[in-house]
Each structure stands twice: as structure tokens, then as C-alpha cells.
Amino acid sequence: MIKLKDLMLEGNSCSNCSRPKSPLLTEQTNPEKVSPNMLYHVYQKLPLTENTFRYGSEAFLDLWQEARWLHDNNQMIFEGVDKQLLEETEIGKFDFYNGKLVPIDLLMEEVDLEEADKKKKTPPIGKPKRGGSKKFYVYVRKPGGGVKKVSFGDTTGLSAKINNPEARRAFAKRHDCANKKDRTKASYWSCRLPRYAKLLGLKSSFSGFW
């Protein structure tokens, strides 16, 4: 299977080859209907594989989409790797994927970008933060899949007495912290607040239950 990027590199890095040929206008071509970027390659005698656009960028895709139309309609002559790309790959073509119009031969790159974007949008799991509807909040994974935001902490103005041993013991007993195992419950995180003291800007060296 032809790899698009490999062909691009081949067209750019063949030091022992003669100079790759640039696109040529035909007698049928109206230069006024050809984009400045395409004409640049024609007049500067540069193959399209030597374009300076970032791989996968809008300008990159526009150039190859135009090249495909010109090639398919006999409006321009392409040779070498340019011709191979247009005749043996789907570069310059688009189709719908998951309801979104995407470049066909860059489909895997597009999917990878979408996955990366999803990862950016996925909040950090198991790392409590200040704020939210209560004093603190944390994102956890639900047993059946998905992510849940858990808000916890006192909202009446009371301070967390992490460094007071008696207060810790009383809290742990009152809330039955030893039996709080469900990470999707506020009580689990309240009982383990001292463990995340540094993360939440609290001063404590205690890392157990209250």
C-alpha cells in the first residue's frame, strides 16, 4: 500500500535523481482560473511535492485538491511523483467520515487529530481541584464507562482541620471513612482529603484518613 508521506519525501529528497519536473499548463488551461499557489510551482519550475505548506494544512489540501481537478480535466500536466500521487492515491479527494467532511488519503491523520483533541478535552482523572459547586471537585471514571465530576468539601465556611489529630479521628469515625471505597462518591474524597493536600494548596504531611 502506498504511503502518502513516503511519496512526498521521495519527491523531495532524491539527491541522485534529475530535477523533478514541475506542473505544466496545457493549451486548454486558462491561467486566470489557476490559483497563484499553483502558478508559482509552474513558473518557478517546482513540483508540488516541494510545496512549503504544512502537511495536512488547509493550504496544503487546497493545492492538491486543485491539482486533482486540473489533472482529471486535462487542464495541466503532472509528472514524476506528482503524477504518481494523483494517479495512485486519493490525495485531493474528500468524503464524509462520522458526519464530517475529511480528506480521504489523510483520513488516518484526521482520525489521529480527532483522538488527540478528545484527549485534550478529557479532564485529568483522580486529581482533586479547588472550586466547583462545593469547595473541591474531582473527575473519576464511572464503572460502566464515561467520566463523572464529583464535588465535595464543606461549603459553610469551616476549615479543614487536617493537622489536628483529634479532629481527624472524629471526622473519620463520624463519616465511617474506613468503609468508604466508592471513588464516585463525595464521601470517598472527603475522607481522603489529606492525601491531596499539596494538590489543593493545603498544608499537611498526613496522608491517611481523617
Image (spheres, rainbow, N blue to C red):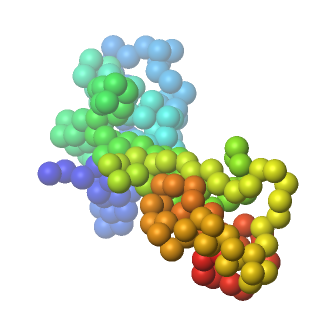
Taking the image as shown, residue 21 lies to the left or right of residue 43, namely: left
Q: Which of 6 and 182 is in front in this view?
A: 182
Q: Position of residue 192 (x, y in %)?
A: 60, 71
Q: Where is residue 85 shown, x and y percent of the image?
A: 26, 42
Judged from this view, the residue extending furthest toward the left is 1
Residue 94 visible in the displayed image? no
For residue 16, say whether it is visible: yes
Q: Which residue is drawn at 43% across and 14% down?
A: 30
> In the displayed structure, would residue 204 be above or below residue 28?
below
Q: Residue at x 57, y 59 (%)?
A: 187
Image vertical order of residue 78 relative to residue 186, above or below = above
Residue, x 29% and y 35% (percent of image)?
A: 104
Q: Is residue 23 toward the left or the right of residue 137 in the image?
A: left
Figure check: 16 above or below 19 = below
Where is 122 relative to 75, above or below? below
Can you give x and y, in whole percent of width and height, for residue 49 in the image? 39, 47
For the point 43% across and 55% down, the residue is 141
Please identify the quarter of the rendering in which residue 188 is found. bottom right
Q: In the rendered view, does 154 fall on the left or right side of 15?
A: right
Q: Looking at the rendering, in which quadrant would you find the C terminus?
A: bottom right
Position of 29 with respect to 168 (left or right) is left
